[in-house]
């Protein structure tokens, strides 16, 4: 099982290439051995400005318990809440969401931080790969859809001093295949074309 370093109290990323903006997150332990992530992300993408505020809580095994997202764009303010209703089952704003059946995580388009959850939950050994299907929340309108994605841990990626693991990531629906580099705490350092860690 992967042994990550303790999470920092805060982290931040600069949005790059695909959009211009910034994300900051504040991390706190929960009383049940899990974690809560409170984040803010603002950006301009394809000439559209949006702002997203989110809270995500995971249990001690890194299973997502709930997520609440609030957003604002030119179309107005929106809010969505996703609650785990058993393994691979979800409630969206209190109603069953069968289209998300089989999803284990929540992935926010607005956030590099949400790529932290699956790598902790999966605890992949070097060379191993696994699907990490997620409830995907769009940034501009908070629309929720299913996202099928895969993580493969790269053997030997931690060889450098201070380096954490790297994962080959793919999301076929977006035609995305790239290598995500993490720090020892399991937070993304570099997401090609999307985000670079600042602190």
Image (cartoon, grey):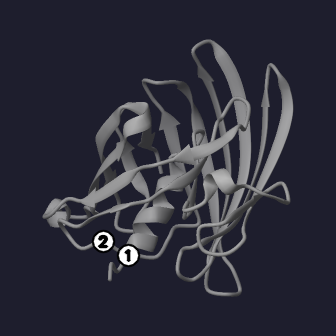
Residue at 34% from the left image edge and 44% from the top image edge: 170
Circle number at residue 139: none
Residue at 26% from the left image edge and 64% from the top image edge: 162
Residue 54 higher or lower than 19, as above or below: below
Which residue occupies the extreme bottom position in the image? Answer: 32
Residue nearest the viewer, comparing 92 with 115: 92
Judged by depth in the image, the label closer to the viewer, 1 or 2, is: 2
Q: Residue 46: where, in percent of width, then height?
A: 57, 14
Measured Cα–Cα span from mark 1 to mark 2: 12 Å
Residue at 48% from the left image edge and 51% from the top image edge: 199
Residue 53 higher or lower than 86, as above or below: above
Disc on the earlier residue, 1 or 2: 1
Check disc 2 and report its element: helix, strand or loop: loop
Q: Name the residue under label 2.
A: 124
Residue at 35% from the left image edge and 57% from the top image edge: 182
Residue nearest the viewer, comparing 191 with 173: 173
Q: Horizontally, is 101 left or right of 78 in the view?
A: left
Which residue occupies the extreme front position in the image? Answer: 98
Q: Residue 131: where, in percent of width, then height?
A: 38, 59
The answer to which image quadrant residue 103 occupies is bottom right
Circle number at residue 4: 1
The answer to which image quadrant residue 161 occupies is bottom left
Q: Residue 179: where, in percent of width, then height?
A: 27, 45
Check disc 1 and report its element: helix, strand or loop: loop
């Amino acid at each position: 099982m992967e042994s990550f370093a303790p999470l920092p109290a805060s982290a931040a990323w600069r949005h790059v290439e695909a959009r211009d903006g910034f994300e900051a997150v504040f991390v706190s332990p929960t009383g049940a051995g899990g974690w809560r992530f409170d984040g803010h992300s603002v950006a301009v993408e394809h000439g559209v400005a949006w702002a997203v505020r989110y809270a995500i809580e995971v249990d001690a095994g890194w299973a997502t318990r709930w997520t609440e997202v609030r957003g604002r764009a030119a179309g107005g303010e929106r809010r969505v809440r996703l609650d785990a209703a058993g393994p691979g089952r979800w409630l969206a704003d209190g109603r069953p969401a069968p289209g998300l059946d089989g999803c284990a995580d929540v992935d926010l388009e607005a956030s590099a931080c949400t790529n932290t959850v699956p790598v902790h939950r999966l605890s992949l050994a070097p060379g191993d790969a696994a699907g990490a299907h997620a409830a995907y929340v769009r940034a501009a309108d908070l629309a929720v859809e299913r996202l099928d994605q895969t993580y493969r841990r790269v053997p030997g990626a931690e060889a450098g001093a201070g380096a954490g693991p790297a994962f080959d990531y793919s999301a076929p629906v977006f035609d995305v295949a790239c290598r995500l580099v993490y720090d020892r705490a399991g937070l993304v350092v570099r997401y090609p074309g999307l985000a670079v860690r600042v602190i």
